Image: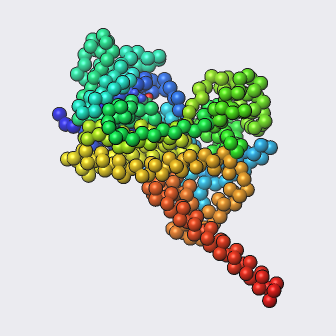
């Protein structure tokens, strides 16, 4: 039997990675704690739609599934800013109208990547398996197996484990040549590394804001009750609400708001509190949100975390990928796109160092770490831009100047948002280049202002 990988977590990146590794001909067992999303029992816990852009699309294209995914996507060529008086301002994301981000359903995407993985006969997916521990040296994973889950399909018996064994104690052990933890921000695989490896560096930082999903249902006949092709933003300085369109005519809104403080999730205790807050802050959205109160009380309040750790691998036995290695806050719409990019880089490293998996894992970490660290900073910074600056005229003028310079200096000047979202330039390079461009532009502007001032003085005095 050839090399076998155990992948833990079949979220967005887990399914895609299983397809990539399966394509290389390795044996892959992909374990997921939840029930099979293909049985229609998708339990999110995360945004139900999200934006996919160039990097993510490229990763899907390599497996020939981009069209399948994008057929249900809704293009969003710009931001629609809602001010407090109900005024609307549209700001395109890019100079080129062909550059847009795409709103896609998380469940549909998850199903597509799992199905893509299962096209390879050497890939198996096992649902209802919660990883509880990993033995790093032997690449052995321990699972608690739920034989049934609400509305879910019971998993088939594991290879090498009779149904009777599994049914009696519900504990499953799986050994492989290597384990990859693709089990999200609260990764059990990473926890095992953290607990067992000397020198493992771990840092988590939570925003003071949480998020809550709310709904704008479809209009009559499945129509959209706001502009369909835009990412809607209600920027309110210290907090904001956004909305992304869904194919059924609805919008998924996400409120990003302080957990604590005079006006916050914590102090909002009654229906009147909720109504008052929304009437004051989002008056144009309220009439479109008939289930506001139910949504507000029933939907959980999620937290927003940045996770950095190092290293991402242990010998040739264990590696981390996606949010498990580098969770970022969602304000650049890049977490999944970056996780998909990880899949490409890991796949390339496994090909390049086919006889030395430890080197492949290390090389993958070296190629990605600087970039995901840069993305983490960009994402936090973009929260301030979205919730505060998008409302201002200066922001809109800066975006116009960006697009003007891009047109005047083709290939030389690229706005940061364009580099991050519409190219595959490494995130760290994009961040550095943007800083340099800003320095040149501001220095030139200062110089021009100085020249203008000298000219005025010369005309007046002389
Ligand atoms: C509100 C919000 C909005 C976002 N919007 C965007 C966006 O627009 N664009 C974008 O690119 N990114 C976005 N993201 C980020 C994106 O959701 C993540 O980066 C992406 O889901 C990471 O994929 P992943 O596979 O690494 O982790 P996940 O998608 O979280 O998948 C992890 C999987 O592992 C499973 N699992 C966890 N623990 C275990 C265990 N112990 N045993 C077995 N299985 C386990 C989970 O059930 C899950 O299926 C957003 C995130 C949030 C919170």
Give the left or right position of residue 31, taking residue 291 as reference. left
Could you tell me residue 417's position as x and y percent?
Answer: 56, 55
Residue drawn 69% across and 60% down?
Answer: 397
Task: Give the answer, above or below, for where 332 lies relative to 207.
Answer: below
Question: Image quadrant of residue 444?
Answer: bottom right
Could you tell me residue 334's position as x and y percent?
Answer: 50, 46
Res. 164 in view? yes
Residue drawn 65% across and 59% down?
Answer: 399
Quadrant in the picture for the C terminus:
bottom right
Give the left or right position of residue 419, taking residue 278 as reference. left
Task: Give the answer, above or below, for where 248 lies relative to 61.
Answer: above
Give the left or right position of residue 393, taking residue 343 as reference. right
Q: Residue furthest right?
A: 460
Give the left or right position of residue 391, taking residue 206 as reference. right
Residue drawn 26% across and 52% down?
Answer: 352
Q: How is the image coloured?
A: rainbow
């Amino acid at each position: 039997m050839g090399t076998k990988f155990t992948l833990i977590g079949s979220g967005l990146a887990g399914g895609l990675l299983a397809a990539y590794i399966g394509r290389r001909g390795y044996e892959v067992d992909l374990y997921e704690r939840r029930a099979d999303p293909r049985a229609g029992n998708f339990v999110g816990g995360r945004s139900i739609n999200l934006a996919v852009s160039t990097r993510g699309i490229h990763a899907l294209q390599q497996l020939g599934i981009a069209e399948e995914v994008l057929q249900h996507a809704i293009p969003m060529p710009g931001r629609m800013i809602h001010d407090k008086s109900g005024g609307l301002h549209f700001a395109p994301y890019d100079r080129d109208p062909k550059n847009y981000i795409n709103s896609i359903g998380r469940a549909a995407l998850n199903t597509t990547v799992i199905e893509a993985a299962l096209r390879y006969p050497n890939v198996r997916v096992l649902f209802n398996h919660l990883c509880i521990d990993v033995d790093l040296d032997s690449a052995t994973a321990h699972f608690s197996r739920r034989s049934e889950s609400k509305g879910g399909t019971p998993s088939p018996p594991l290879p090498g484990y009779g149904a009777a064994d599994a049914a009696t104690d519900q504990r499953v052990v799986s050994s492989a040549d290597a384990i990859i933890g693709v089990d999200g921000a609260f990764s059990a695989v990473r926890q095992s590394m953290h607990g067992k490896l000397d020198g493992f560096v771990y840092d988590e930082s939570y925003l003071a804001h949480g998020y809550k999903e709310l709904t704008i249902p479809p209009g009559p006949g499945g129509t959209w009750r706001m502009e369909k092709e835009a990412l809607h933003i209600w920027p309110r300085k210290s907090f904001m609400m956004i909305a992304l369109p869904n194919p059924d005519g609805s919008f998924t809104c996400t409120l990003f708001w302080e957990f604590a403080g005079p006006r916050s999730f914590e102090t909002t205790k009654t229906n009147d509190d909720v109504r008052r807050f929304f009437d004051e802050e989002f008056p144009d959205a309220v009439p479109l949100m008939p289930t506001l109160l139910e949504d507000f009380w029933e939907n959980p309040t999620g937290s927003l975390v940045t996770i950095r750790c190092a290293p991402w691998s242990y010998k040739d036995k264990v590696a981390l990928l996606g949010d498990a290695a580098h969770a970022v806050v969602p304000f650049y719409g890049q977490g999944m796109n970056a996780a998909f990019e990880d899949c490409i880089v890991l796949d390339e490293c496994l090909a390049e160092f086919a006889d030395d998996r430890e080197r492949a894992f290390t090389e993958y970490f070296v190629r990605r770490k600087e970039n995901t660290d840069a993305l983490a900073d960009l994402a936090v910074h973009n929260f301030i831009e979205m919730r505060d600056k998008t409302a201002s005229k200066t922001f809109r003028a800066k975006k116009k100047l960006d697009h003007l310079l891009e047109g005047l200096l083709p290939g030389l000047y690229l706005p940061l948002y364009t580099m991050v979202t519409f190219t595959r330039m490494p995130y760290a390079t994009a961040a550095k280049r943007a800083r340099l461009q800003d320095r040149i532009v501001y220095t030139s502007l200062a110089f021009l202002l100085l020249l203008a001032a000298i000219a005025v003085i010369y005309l007046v005095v002389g």
